[in-house]
């Protein structure tokens, strides 16, 4: 995941404002040092949303399906999971101490909906937003000042940032890509076809059959299978790999040897705990991306290619 580009004028303004707040500058530098691309933040947000959905038990995949109490709990889970990931020290007045500076953590599913408590006045806030429907997320630092807040009537006396003063947020990452919730963004007809099947194994087979050339996370597999041994349902020896092999479908995992296959075929490379399925045929045209498997060259099939039994994937290997 690449950091978001900021134009030259924004760089100059950001540099000037950072110099006015040495603490903000210090925390900004530390967070970008810990997560240069922002990917670790994105993964925490993805995992937290999935944790709330609890698909293995509930079969849910959409934020709107959460109960109000669950949505309210999201901010606390984001705060906890970020602290676990980055090992932030506990704050005295605020949630964290980052580079020995007190920082509060606020998450909102609605952009601009961060609720700032009275005790945060004068402190730094780490503001986070993620939207599963848009597959986007943002994180920024904000120095809480009374004049920049709406004077609301929340019973906890929590306030929001005035829209006119959101430009006071110093963005670490703005509108970055959130790992995709494949079930949410599937064609509804395909999704309904998957969930209409009675067994977890049948649902997984249909998922890998219908969702090809896209990263499928372990959580999606868990949600579709709704079984404790969901990973077993992906593998060979009776799993989806075996069931779909006669159709020419490969299920590429996160092993280095598998990633090399994805790269050779011009497909997205699976990340940690991810899969990519694809239907392949023996290569007939030298111009198409291809890779050697089982002593023959293979390429991605198109709709006109008849099914061929898929080759074996390379042995499982990972970098040490």
Image: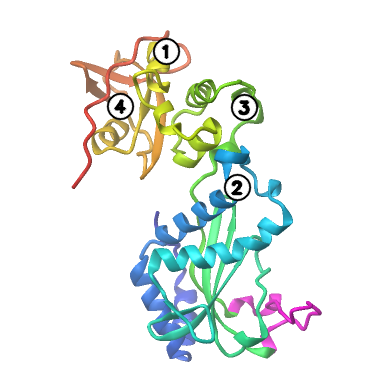
Q: CA distance from mark 2 to mark 4?
A: 38 Å
* Element at label 4: loop
Q: Earlier in the sequence, mark 2 or mark 3?
A: 2
For mark 4, does the 10 Å Cα neighbourhood hold few (<14), some (14 to 19), or many (20 or more) residues? some
| Residue wearing tag 1 | 247
Q: Which mark's residue is nearer the viewer, 3 or 1?
A: 3
SS type, badge 2: helix
Upstream in sequence: badge 1 or badge 2: 2
The residue to which callout 2 is attached is 53
* Highlighted magenta segment, given as a residue range: 147-167
Left or right: 119 in relation to 97: right
User: Which numbered disc flags the more N-terminal residue, 4 or 1?
Assistant: 1
Q: Main secondary structure of the magenta part?
A: loop
For marks 3 and 1 on the same chain, the one whose residue lies earlier in the sequence: 3
Task: Name the residue carrying label 4.
Answer: 289
Inspect the magenta stretch and tell me whether residue 16 lies in it.
no
Q: Which residue is mark 3?
A: 195
């Amino acid at each position: 995941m690449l950091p978001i580009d900021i134009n030259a004028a924004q760089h100059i303004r950001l540099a000037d404002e950072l110099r006015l707040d040495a603490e903000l500058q210090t925390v900004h530098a530390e967070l970008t040092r810990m997560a240069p691309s922002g990917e670790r933040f994105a993964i925490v947000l993805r995992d937290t949303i999935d944790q709330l959905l609890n698909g293995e038990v509930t079969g849910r995949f959409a934020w709107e399906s959460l109960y109000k109490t669950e949505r309210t709990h999201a901010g606390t889970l984001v705060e906890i999971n970020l602290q676990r990931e980055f090992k932030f020290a506990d704050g005295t007045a605020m949630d964290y101490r980052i580079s020995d500076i007190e920082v509060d953590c606020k998450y909102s599913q609605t952009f601009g909906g961060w609720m700032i408590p009275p005790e945060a006045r004068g402190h730094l806030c780490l503001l986070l937003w993620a939207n599963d429907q848009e597959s986007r997320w943002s994180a920024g630092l904000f120095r809480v000042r009374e004049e920049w807040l709406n004077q609301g009537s929340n019973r906890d006396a929590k306030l929001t940032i005035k829209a006119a003063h959101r430009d006071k947020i110093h963005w670490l990452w703005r509108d970055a890509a959130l790992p995709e919730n494949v079930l949410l963004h599937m064609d509804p007809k395909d999704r309904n076809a998957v969930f209409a099947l009675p067994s977890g194994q049948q649902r997984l087979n249909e998922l890998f059959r219908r969702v090809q050339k896209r990263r499928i996370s372990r959580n999606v597999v868990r949600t579709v299978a709704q079984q404790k041994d969901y990973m077993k349902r992906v593998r060979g020896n009776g799993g989806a790999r075996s069931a779909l092999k006669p159709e020419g479908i490969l299920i590429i995992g996160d092993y280095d040897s598998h990633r090399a296959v994805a790269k050779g075929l011009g497909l997205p490379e699976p990340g940690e705990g991810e899969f990519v399925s694809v239907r392949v045929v023996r290569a007939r045209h030298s111009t198409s991306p291809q890779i050697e498997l089982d002593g023959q060259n293979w390429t991605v099939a198109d709709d006109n290619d008849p099914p061929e039994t898929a080759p074996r994937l390379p042995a499982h290997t990972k970098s040490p």
